[in-house]
Structure formats: structure tokens, C-alpha cells
Image (cartoon, rainbow, N blue to C red):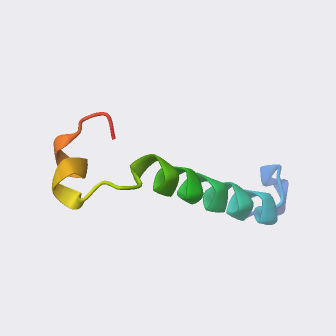
Amino acid sequence: MSEGAGRAWRFCIRDMIVFAGNVLDYTRGMDQPSFVANRLV
């Protein structure tokens, strides 16, 4: 990532970690067939 891109790369990685945690929370308790069948997720 270039220096002129705005935010430091550490913030982008932190955002990705938070996003991944949100996805895990949202899909908790779902198996793959129910995940695939649910168009909302």
C-alpha cells in the first residue's frame, strides 16, 4: 500500500479483523446448507 493512500495499513488490518468477527457473529449457528440457502447472508 502506498504512503499517499490515506490511512495507515494497521487501521485497514484492524478493520478486516473487526469485519471478520462481525461475519462470524452474524452467521453463528448456521451450517453450510442453511448459509447457502439464505439469500440474506
Q: Which residue lies at the image location 31% right of the left edge and 34% below the top edge?
A: 40
Residue 32 or residue 19, whichever sits in front:
32
On screen, residue 38 above or below 31 = above
Residue positioned most to the top? 40
Q: Is residue 21 left or right of residue 23?
A: right
On screen, residue 32 above or below 6 = below
Q: Is residue 11 left or right of residue 39?
A: right
Q: Which residue lies at the image location 56% right of the left edge and 50% below the top edge?
A: 22
Residue 18 or residue 29, whichever sits in front:
29
Q: Where is residue 9 in the image (x, y as percent from the top left)?
A: 77, 64
Q: Which residue lies at the image location 48% right of the left edge and 57% below the top edge?
A: 24
* Quarter placement of the C terminus: top left
Q: Which residue lies at the image location 16% right of the left edge and 55% below the top edge?
A: 33
Q: Is residue 22 left or right of residue 13?
A: left
Q: Position of residue 15 (x, y in %)?
A: 69, 54
Q: Position of residue 12 (x, y in %)?
A: 71, 58
Q: In this view, does 41 lie to the left or right of 19?
A: left
For the image shown, how many numbered marks are present on the structure?
Answer: 0
* Quarter placement of the N terminus: bottom right
On screen, residue 1 above or below 30 = below
